[in-house]
């Protein structure tokens, strides 16, 4: 069997020989593990496309137990992501998270297009790092986290009906464990919650429905972005059983 698909390289793993294992997030087959024979050698035709962040067209042989890359063509290498520590740190975070929240062989074109767009935004923004035009990377991260809550089937309940008791009075607190807003009675007794005013809820709604490119042209005060990033990162980790995001320490080390 052969498969031709566009895919993003979300992870590479070295082997003892010249081969590389690639984790691809593909349009037609979701997340798949493949081997690129000889790709560790710079002479190999597969070498240039066997790098993290590469978006390419891959021809795969799925006949054997391990799927093999027969040939590949780069659509966008997103090489500029590696030009700055900042873009590299965020890039690593995004592809690690993409890998952590996806199940093998589950096709999701919406998620696929989103992560490719994020890579393109990040790569193109590399030129503006340190200028006034710099992309708001924390907003990009928050948008991905919020959209992931929908993509992974864990969208938070943000209606003014308590997620826990269905009460409609004082539904003001966001609880990760409960999966959305809870009331004053349930907060502190059944669940721990963070008080969120209407501006926060409107912002979450906006980031849920708007296109990522439109969002990135919007200015949003950093206080909101910081607070919601904390909430939604915990939320995604909790509901997807993620115990650690390794690239977080890299992000922290560069002061993000
Ligand atoms: Zn309640």
Image (cartoon, rainbow, N blue to C red):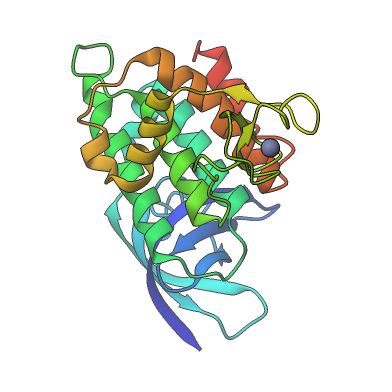
197 above or below 55? above
Question: Is residue 213 found left or right of 3 in the rendered image?
Answer: left
Residue 45 in view? no
Examine the rendered structure and indicate whether residue 47 appears above or below residue 231: below
Can residue 8 be seen at all in this image of the molecule? yes
Where 26 falls versus 150 (above or below)? below
Residue at the image position 58 percent from the left and 57 percent from the top: 102
Question: Looking at this view, is 242 or 182 the one in front?
Answer: 182
Q: x and y percent of residue 124 in the render?
A: 23, 34
Residue farthest to the right, as pictured: 189
Quarter location, residue 234: top right
The residue closer to the viewer here, 103 or 6, is 103
Which residue ends up furthest to the bottom in the rendered image?
1
Quarter of the rendered structure image containing ligand 1: top right
Where is residue 125 shown, x and y percent of the image?
25, 29
Quarter location, residue 246: top right
Nearer to the camera, 196 or 16? 196
At which x and y percent is residue 44? Answer: 43, 58
Q: Residue at x 63, y 41 (%)?
A: 167
Who's the residue at 67% across and 46% down the image? 239
Residue 107's spot in the image, x, y percent?
48, 70
Q: Is residue 142 left or right of residue 253?
A: left
**What is the count of numbered marks?**
0
Residue sitting at 53 percent across and 49 percent down? 155
């Amino acid at each position: 069997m052969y498969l031709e698909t566009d895919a993003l390289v979300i992870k590479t793993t070295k082997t003892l020989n010249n081969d590389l294992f690639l984790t691809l997030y593909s349009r037609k087959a979701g997340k798949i593990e493949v081997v690129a024979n000889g790709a560790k050698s710079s002479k190999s035709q597969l070498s240039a496309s066997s790098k993290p962040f590469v978006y390419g067209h891959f021809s795969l042989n799925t006949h054997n137990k391990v799927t093999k890359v027969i040939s590949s063509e780069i659509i966008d290498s997103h090489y500029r992501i590696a030009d700055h520590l900042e873009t590299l740190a965020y890039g690593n975070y995004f592809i690690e998270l993409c890998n952590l929240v996806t199940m093998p062989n589950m096709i999701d074109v919406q998620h696929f297009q989103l992560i490719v767009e994020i890579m393109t935004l990040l790569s193109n923004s590399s030129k503006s790092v340190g200028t006034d035009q710099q992309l708001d990377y924390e907003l990009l991260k928050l948008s991905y986290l919020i959209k992931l809550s929908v993509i992974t089937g864990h969208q938070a309940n943000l209606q003014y009906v308590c997620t826990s008791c269905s009460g409609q009075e004082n539904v003001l607190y966001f609880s990760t464990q409960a999966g959305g807003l809870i009331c004053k009675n349930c907060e502190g007794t059944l669940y721990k919650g963070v008080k969120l005013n209407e501006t926060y809820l409107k912002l979450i709604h906006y980031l849920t429905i708007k296109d990522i490119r439109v969002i990135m042209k919007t200015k949003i005060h950093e206080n909101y972005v910081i607070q919601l990033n904390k909430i939604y990162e915990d939320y995604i980790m909790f509901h997807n059983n993620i115990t650690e995001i390794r690239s977080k320490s890299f992000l922290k080390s560069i002061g993000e």
